[in-house]
Image (tube, helix red, strand yellow):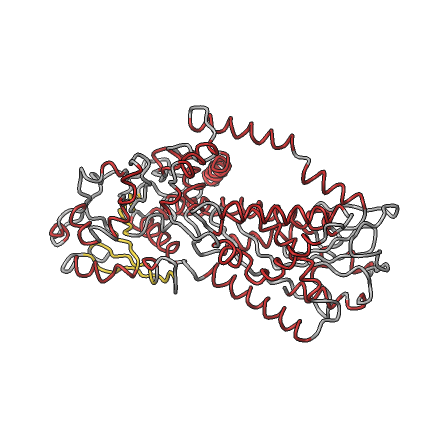
Amino acid sequence: MKASLDAARLLSNHRESPNPVRLSPSIFCTRHNRRPIHDTLAALCIAPSPTSLPGTPSFPGHRPPHLPSFRSPALRFARHASDCPMPSTTDSAPDTNPSGPRAPPQTLPTSYRDSLPPLFPLLLAFRLANALTLRTFFQPDEFFQSLEPAWHLAFGPASNAWITWEWTTQLRSSLHPALFAAVYRVAARVAQAGGLSLPAKAKVLLVAPKVTQAVSAALLDCYTWNLAGKVYGRGTRPALAASADQYGTDGTSCAVILASLVSDRLYYGVWTIPPVRFLYFNIAQSLAVFYGKNRADYYFTEGLPLLLTTALPFAMVGLWQSLQARDEPAVGQRILTRLSWTSIAMTVTLSLISHKEVRFLYPILPFLHIIAARPLSQFLPAQAATWRRATVLFLLVANVLLAGYASQVHQRGVIDVLAYIRHKHETRNALSTMSRSTHTTTITTNTTAAFLMPCHSTPWRSHLVYPEITAWALTCEPPIHVPLAERSTYLDEADEFYIHPGPVGWLKANMEDVDTVRNTGSRSSQHWMRQDPKFKRKYRRQWPQHLVFFEQLEETLQEHLSGSRYKECWRGFNSHFHDDRRRVGDVIVWCLDGV
């Protein structure tokens, strides 16, 4: 938004030009070819990460670099825009821009152009800063559908990674975790070759997937900018190149499908097509409904507003404009129309499925940013009224505040608690004092923990790291083998804990008698029940060294464990609000004997 304001000021002398400035909500950069700059694409920079990104989810807001006077930050990138491939034009190429004839030539001073930095390194620097400073939790799939199976692939079953039911039923493609498994292996070997201590190696393993995803996100930003340039660029050649680049991908698609088939064969040991099995389990058997149902208008009334935030009105106007311009001859306009129809079709199709999540719309987010560009530029012309500038400034501030809160505050406790347990394990075993050149076998004692939380409330082995940290959490396996007639009354383990028989009843039925933690002595984890629902009735779990839970459960546990040796040893803020009331408030850790 700040870049949009600066761009409008810079081009105030173009007010009468028939070719208006166009702004793109993807990244801060400007196309600069042999011709003068005709279009300026600035950004809201509201892009997802997914992994999922793993560990690197991104939220609205991006503060552009400070520049004096009224120059747009976008112009700083014009010199080396070729680092992010852009279409080129020649003077012989006819003007196909639907907005009108070519604007009068404008040039930048040579000294200014020569000082412009390359584009991609700046995008990468921003994404790295975003990934490495992120302190919050967004979605379980960031970890359990990528980093956990990747950890299992890289370090084997002994690593104690948590493999969820989707992988045992072959619902997921192995390509994504295979990438991060390779990253983990390389990072582990680099740490070993460098003679790093175990805590330092753990930090390397934590950072490695974040750096990988930062590179991926920077490339996405770069090619979003590239696509925006093709849509709003000038000349026939870039428009035709856009069609070829975006829609002529048969060879690449076949290669990806083949690689996926081979990868899944190697991972699962049998020939399988996970997308087909996914449709069967989640639609034919309606298992997706088990994880929640939403009303039909959810994506339109909640999903898109949450996804686009302050860019929503511009995207809606852009969709309307692109669908109204049916007689426009420009190829760029036709591409814009295709992007609009694709976004609408995907949103409508996903609305037909009962289970809905905002993140399912992430693939169309770059399209929506590009679609929002024209209305944003029209809202902020070269010499905009004061109220318009104030509105854009307000939207910018709102984005910055949202970005800071979502990436640094909201749901940070579930990340911090794993760092606490990991560091405590390192301290107990004096791992940081181990010689980096030692070849002797070091015996480490287990650190035990139980997470009495809704299932998948925290990351797992990708943040606990050490296999000697023996931990378990409440599960939420779907009723795969339960007859349809009985599914309405089915309760997973987490539901049993919170609903029936409730926390106290569940603890009495599944844990050792409370008297065992009212006596002296510590409990080991040698006979802990396996993390598999079919064993949950056969054994009683022993009380661990650490109980981890949300503030909502505090009073219940205080009453049930009154007089026990558990004492609060850590508390960290998690959230002011949450759509799941069980997750509101602090994350609390009780330690046996308070240590």
Q: In the displayed image of the protein, which residue is found farthest to the right?
A: 92
| Residue at (43% x, 45% y) in the render | 141
| Residue at (40% x, 50% y) in the render | 293
| Residue at (22% x, 50% y) in the render | 500
Look at the image and tell me in which quarter the N terminus lies: bottom right
Closer to us: 431 or 109: 109
| Residue at (34% x, 63% y) in the render | 585
Depicted 402 relative to depicted 233: above or below: below
Residue 10 position within the rendered picture, expressed as x and y whole percent measured from the top left: 75, 66
Residue 389 position within the rendered picture, expressed as x and y whole percent measured from the top left: 66, 71
Depicted 321 relative to depicted 386: above or below: above
Residue 328 position within the rendered picture, expressed as x and y whole percent measured from the top left: 76, 50
Q: Is residue 252 visible?
A: yes
Depicted 404 relative to depicted 332: above or below: below
Look at the image and tell me in which quarter the C terminus lies: bottom left
Q: Is residue 335 left or right of residue 128?
A: right
Q: In the displayed image of the protein, which residue is found farthest to the top?
A: 270
Q: Is residue 338 left or right of residue 476?
A: right
